[in-house]
């Protein structure tokens, strides 16, 4: 190809790029043969078009197709040889820039840039300096700068004729990419940003003016855009643009003029000078006319976006919708870069996302797709950070934000910019803190600080240090107040904050100094409030000097948030001094100043309202101080203050709801309740009753937000997902919400609603996790398959769920897509049934057909089923502190009875029952065991009236009651387990899932495709026995004989001793519906995940060593809770009988969240588990099992409706316990320690 042809192709590509005709340009490039596009000069032009377009994959590919890079080894010390021409150097610098946008390889790009820059002296070019001097000489001929400005056009024309510079197109590109890369590296913290940008503006500006003076306006305009965007002073940037506009006269430069006018319009709109802003409209029209005249590809789209971005006439939500339409226009024009950036910044914190949810979902899905098409890792990071930042403010997306961050953070590119990396650490720390994971939050923040230390900018380091100090302080919340650990955490946080506030002062970082001073003041105030006594009121509080220092540093232009913080601290300080009236006045005055402002964020206004509410309450409480006799007018005034506090707090609540932040909404809701509770103490009148009824609606709205936050935890990862959900529900405010619901319902004399609130607060995280694997009935799936719309929606949902398995996916985008899709599914009649099944485990109602089928298999009617529950009030005085018993019928009829027992009574009994010296006999095993057990009978008082003998009772204990054998307590003259059929369940939601599994037997998976796990019924039961104790050979032999006997009576396969390895056990479980294990279990109190069944490691520890030299160890292997959570069990459920010490012992976290062997088996797919609630004697275990299986054989098996053999578990348990209790299985087993340990969790029956 000759030079003329080469230049023609380059010129054609360049024109396509310059005129914004990207699609035509790409088409032209694709039409060229590979031999042509592989030529370096053409590759440079093509890659530049792709870079401006935002097609980074294509830019990278076309460079790869050209000659290979000369920088295969970046660690070499050789400089590029002087024989290299400018074309090669420009090409390599452009490729280095592509490394950044395509792969986020900042370090590699910077190394290349520095080596090329050193070789070509790009950082200090004397040639540019001499050119600049020539311009200066000519300019000095006229001292009048205004005259000079008018003569720029004439000067440029004459200069072009008079002088030809030595700057080739490639030398210009070298300078451009050299500084472009250095600026990006500086923005990412690798270089000093202010210095680099100032130098880049100067160097590029000088080169641009030389080209401009020589009439090379197209190249000058190319540099001008970069120049003005790195200039610190916007006023000077605007001046440069206006000067260039004068120079670009004539039809030849219409594109340059239009682009420059558009930039001028943007800078004018940014200006704070109203006169400058007023000129923007004129520029709009001129630019639009020019863009239309030259048929520019995207110029008018830019103008529309500018006008929209700076408009104050529409809401944030409407602006978002309009921006998504503009982004579509960009993509239609082939401008990926601007389209992507438009979408990334389309969502603003001010918009109410729920109102525009469909638009948000579609926009984010489009954004993700376009970023993937463009192939930019750095844009992916920007999008992720922005979407996570939004999700962190919206409760229903907290969990997805966590999953996205954890996934990407664990796989960040090796050369990710430290600024983005540190920012991700900070975001991750914030999300962990939201979940109450303060130690994880501190670790993430500390890592972020270490990353920030590699950033040149002091500001980034200081901000990261602030985060670490806050997290260190929050760790104190994990320890008891006043404990050594709490004090150390507080001291660590304050110490670090004080260290960095002094650094801020030295570095001149005033914003950081203000922020840290205010935080220190807040913490000092908290310490003062915590230790405050009437005799300790200080006239010079510790926080005062920090507040005064912050006020001195705060500029007059400080935003309302910063000033609100000062008002907050000043009022707190006055509280410590008892100046309540003055405190309230300051808060109300500040609130009045914020009320009518439209520019203040809702959260700032909400905080002001809540602050005023708090001050009003404190002043009222001060008036109502105990022991004071109030005059009627004083009491009336105090009551008015309470109503004022209620009004202010309700206003705050409504504003907080607009922010979607769960914690803020939750805390404010509870504050509103405290005010209402104060107003309605005693017997509320009609108005008080109305207040209570109205607040119930507010409570339900808040509960929905908390519910969405918990559900936002991505339902994958099994155990980790459950633990994250547990972190949410265990928060004190979250637990109190449900307690308030119970107390409010009882106050309204509505025990049915009280029971619903009680159940809502039980094991929600566990029920959520079970619901993630809910099975859909085959009959319903068949109907869905015949409905085209429903089938398509279900497939789309499945696609999104499968996508969640990808650790690198943006989970926030997927979350919004899933939420939108499921909203659409609820509008479909068939799919709404599936939604109801999934959500049914949280609706606290059991399916009528399922339950009636299950009861009929056992000869029971619905009237004979009762749910028994206990509510433990918060630590309160008097009668309100006593436990409340609930009995609920299937028809919803609920009765409540306040018992004579309190939570401290129960805790004391548990301590005495299970805390004793190692060699001492357990209290429940002594002759006085039955009498000792009966001391807790108060927990079941009332059941004799509220239930009938023979009823099926489903017990759902609360808190410390989980450690009490409730089934063994006496009702009338009999133990409850003898009087009634008794099973346990952590919640009705869990029971509902067990029922669902049982009714899914022999049905298909959710995709409608049978799996191996769905048909294990052809396999017999599995019996396992492991007792690898050489010193107890005789007991081992008895156990093995016992297990073989059981397997002959209840047909099944037997695995004994060294055959029962961890892998063998897990391989056999998917092949059966019935598992029996006899052996040891370990309960790890400090870490329940280490609780385990003790199996064999495969070695026979009883085999004698002939030489007698080798010592044999225990030969055991543990199957722990984590393993069981991940076990594969048959669809349709399995029954487990675990005869082992502590096999039924569970860790009950706040919120009655269970974790242990039984919950792990239920999670994995079990429908019922029979276990032991405390350590048992192996002999008692054998005696129990012998009789239990006899009872099953005698009357426990009969045919169900589908021909399955029904196994009556609860009847067999009842009969066996009665015989043990009466001494029929051995007089030594009459004490409750032996018979009360056995409990049945889950369904009361099974199927063979």
Image (spheres, rainbow, N blue to C red):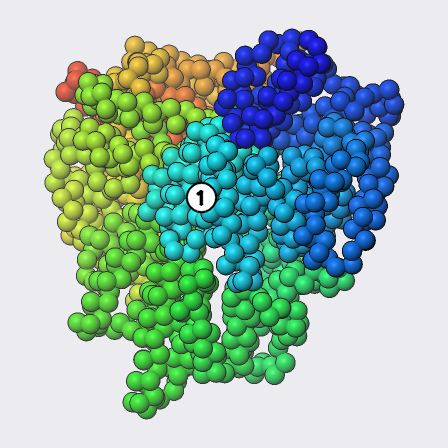
From the viewer's perspective, tell me whether residue 567 is left or right of residue 243. left
Label 1: few (<14), some (14–19) or many (≥20) C-alpha neighbours in 10 Å: some
The image shows residue 391, relative to residue 856, as above or below, that is below
Q: Residue at x 26, y 72 (%)?
A: 680
**Towards the viewer: 877 or 734:** 734
Q: Residue at x 44, y 69 (%)?
A: 594
Quadrant in which residue 1125 is drawn: top left
Query: Where residue 411 appears, x then y in whole percent?
Result: 60, 30
Query: Where residue 198 appears, x then y in whole percent?
Result: 74, 48
Q: Residue at x 49, y 52 (%)?
A: 282
Residue bearing mark 1: 304
From the viewer's perspective, tell me whether residue 165 is left or right of residue 801. right
Query: Where residue 627 appears, x then y in whole percent?
Result: 39, 85
The image shows residue 1151, relative to residue 301, as above or below, that is below
From the viewer's perspective, tell me whether residue 488 is left or right of residue 278. right
**Towards the viewer: 124 or 2:** 2
If the image is split into quadrants, where does the C terminus sit?
A: top left
């Amino acid at each position: 190809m000759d030079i003329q042809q080469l230049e023609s192709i380059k010129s054609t590509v360049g024109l396509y790029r310059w005129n914004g005709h990207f699609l035509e340009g790409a088409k032209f490039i694709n039409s060229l043969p590979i031999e042509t596009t592989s030529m370096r000069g053409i590759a440079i032009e093509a890659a530049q078009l792709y870079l401006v377009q935002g097609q980074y994959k294509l830019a990278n590919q076309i460079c790869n197709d050209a000659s290979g890079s000369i920088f295969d080894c970046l660690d070499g010390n050789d400089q590029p040889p002087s024989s290299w021409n400018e074309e090669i150097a420009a090409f390599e610098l452009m490729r280095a820039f592509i490394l950044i946008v395509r792969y986020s390889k900042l370090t590699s790009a910077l190394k290349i840039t520095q080596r090329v820059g050193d070789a070509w002296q790009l950082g200090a070019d004397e040639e540019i300096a001499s050119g600049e001097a020539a311009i200066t000489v000519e300019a000095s001929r006229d001292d009048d700068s205004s005259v000079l400005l008018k003569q720029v056009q004439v000067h440029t024309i004459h200069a072009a004729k008079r002088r030809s510079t030595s700057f080739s197109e490639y030398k210009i590109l070298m300078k451009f990419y050299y500084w472009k890369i250095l600026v990006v590296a500086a923005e990412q913290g690798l270089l000093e940003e202010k210095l680099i940008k100032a130098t880049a503006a100067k160097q590029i500006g000088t080169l641009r003016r030389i080209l401009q003076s020589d009439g090379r306006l197209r190249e000058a305009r190319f540099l001008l855009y970069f120049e003005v965007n790195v200039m610190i002073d916007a006023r000077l940037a605007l001046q440069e643009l206006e000067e260039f506009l004068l120079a670009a006269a004539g039809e030849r430069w219409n594109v340059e003029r239009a682009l420059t006018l558009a930039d001028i319009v943007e800078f004018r709109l940014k200006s704070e000078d109203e006169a400058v802003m007023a000129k923007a409209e004129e520029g709009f029209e001129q630019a639009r006319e020019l863009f239309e005249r030259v048929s520019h590809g995207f110029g008018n789209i830019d103008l529309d976006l500018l006008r929209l971005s700076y408009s104050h006439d529409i809401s944030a939500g409407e602006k978002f919708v309009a921006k998504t339409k503009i982004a579509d226009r960009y993509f239609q024009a082939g401008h990926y870069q601007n389209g992507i950036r438009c979408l990334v910044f389309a969502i603003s914190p001010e918009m109410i996302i729920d109102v525009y949810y469909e638009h948000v979902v579609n926009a984010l899905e489009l954004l993700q797709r376009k970023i993937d098409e463009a192939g930019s890792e750095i844009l992916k990071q920007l999008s992720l950070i922005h979407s996570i930042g939004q999700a962190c403010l919206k409760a229903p997306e907290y969990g997805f934000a966590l999953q996205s961050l954890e996934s990407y953070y664990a796989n960040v590119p090796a050369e990710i910019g430290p600024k983005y990396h540190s920012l991700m650490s900070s975001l991750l720390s914030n999300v962990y803190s939201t979940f109450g994971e303060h130690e994880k939050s501190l670790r993430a923040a500390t890592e972020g600080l270490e990353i920030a230390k590699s950033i040149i900018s002091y500001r980034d380091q200081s901000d990261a240090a602030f985060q670490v100090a806050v997290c260190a302080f929050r760790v104190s919340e994990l320890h008891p107040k006043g404990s050594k650990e709490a004090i150390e955490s507080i001291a660590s946080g304050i110490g670090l904050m004080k260290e960095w506030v002094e650094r801020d002062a030295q570095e001149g970082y005033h914003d950081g100094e203000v922020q840290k001073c205010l935080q220190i003041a807040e913490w000092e105030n908290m310490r003062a409030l915590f230790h405050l006594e009437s005799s300790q009121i200080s006239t010079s509080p510790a926080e005062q000097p920090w507040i005064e220092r912050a006020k001195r540093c705060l500029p007059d232009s400080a935003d309302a948030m910063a000033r609100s913080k000062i008002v907050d601290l000043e009022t707190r300080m006055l509280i410590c001094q008892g100046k309540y009236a003055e405190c309230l006045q300051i808060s109300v005055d500040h609130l009045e100043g914020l009320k009518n402002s439209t520019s203040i964020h809702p959260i700032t206004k909400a905080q002001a309202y809540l602050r005023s509410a708090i001050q009003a309450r404190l002043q009222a409480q001060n008036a109502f101080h105990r022991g004071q006799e109030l005059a009627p007018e004083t009491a009336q005034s105090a009551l008015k203050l309470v109503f004022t506090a209620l009004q202010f707090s309700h206003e705050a609540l409504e504003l907080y709801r607009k922010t979607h932040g769960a914690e803020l909404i939750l805390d404010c809701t509870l504050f509103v309740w405290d005010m209402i509770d104060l107003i309605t103490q005693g017997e509320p009148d009609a108005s008080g009753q109305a207040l209570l009824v109205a607040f119930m609606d507010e409570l339900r709205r808040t509960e929905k937000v908390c519910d969405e936050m918990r559900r936002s935890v991505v339902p994958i990862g099994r155990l980790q997902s459950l633990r994250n959900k547990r972190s949410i529900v265990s928060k004190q405010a979250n637990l109190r919400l449900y307690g308030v619901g119970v107390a409010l319902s009882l106050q309204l004399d509505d025990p049915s609603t009280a029971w619903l609130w009680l159940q809502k607060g039980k094991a929600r995280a566990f029920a959520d996790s079970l619901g993630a694997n809910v099975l859909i009935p085959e009959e319903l799936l068949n109907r869905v398959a015949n409905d085209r719309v429903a089938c398509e929606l279900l497939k789309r949902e499945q696609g999104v769920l499968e996508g969640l398995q990808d650790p690198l996916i943006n989970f926030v985008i997927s979350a919004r897509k899933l939420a939108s899709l499921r909203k659409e599914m609820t509008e479909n009649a068939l799919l709404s049934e599936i939604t109801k099944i999934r959500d049914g485990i949280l609706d606290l109602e059991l399916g009528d057909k399922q339950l009636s089928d299950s009861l009929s298999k056992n000869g029971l009617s619905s009237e004979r089923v009762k749910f028994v529950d206990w509510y433990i009030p918060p630590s309160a005085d008097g009668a309100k502190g006593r436990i409340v018993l609930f009995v609920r019928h299937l028809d919803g009829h609920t009765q409540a009875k306040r018992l004579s027992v309190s939570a401290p009574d129960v805790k004391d009994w548990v301590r005495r029952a299970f805390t004793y010296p190692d060699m001492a006999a357990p209290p429940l095993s002594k002759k006085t065991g039955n009498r000792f057990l009966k001391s807790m009978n108060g927990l079941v008082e009332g059941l004799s009236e509220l239930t009938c003998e023979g009823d099926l009772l489903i017990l759902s204990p609360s808190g410390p009651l989980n450690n009490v054998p409730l089934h063994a307590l006496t009702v009338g003259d009999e133990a409850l387990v003898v009087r009634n059929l008794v099973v346990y369940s952590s919640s009705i939601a869990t029971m509902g899932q067990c029922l669902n599994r049982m009714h899914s037997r022999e049905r298909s998976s959710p995709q409608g495709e049978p799996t191996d796990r769905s048909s294990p019924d052809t396999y017999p039961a599995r019996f396992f026995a492991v007792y690898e104790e050489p010193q107890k050979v005789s007991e081992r032999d008895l156990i093995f004989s016992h297990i073989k006997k059981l397997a002959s009576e209840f047909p099944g396969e037997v695995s004994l001793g060294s055959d029962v390895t961890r892998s063998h056990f897990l391989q056999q479980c998917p092949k059966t519906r019935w598992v029996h294990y006899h052996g040891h279990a370990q309960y790890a109190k400090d870490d329940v995940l280490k609780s385990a069944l003790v199996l064999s490691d495969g070695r026979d520890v009883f085999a004698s060593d002939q030489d007698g030299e080798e010592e044999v160890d225990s030969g055991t292997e543990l199957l722990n809770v984590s393993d069981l959570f991940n076990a594969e069990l048959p669809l349709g459920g399995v029954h487990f009988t675990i005869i082992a010490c502590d096999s039924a012992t569970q860790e009950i976290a706040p919120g009655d969240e269970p974790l242990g062997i039984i919950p792990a088996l239920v999670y994995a797919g079990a429908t019922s588990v029979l276990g032991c609630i405390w350590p048992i004697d192996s002999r008692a275990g054998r005696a129990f099992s012998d009789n239990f299986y006899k009872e099953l054989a005698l009357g426990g098996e009969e045919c169900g409706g589908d021909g399955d053999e029904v196994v009556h578990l609860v009847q067999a348990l009842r009969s066996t316990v009665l015989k043990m209790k009466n001494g029929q299985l051995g007089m030594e087993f009459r004490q409750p320690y032996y018979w009360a340990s056995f409990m049945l969790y889950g369904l009361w029956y099974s199927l063979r």
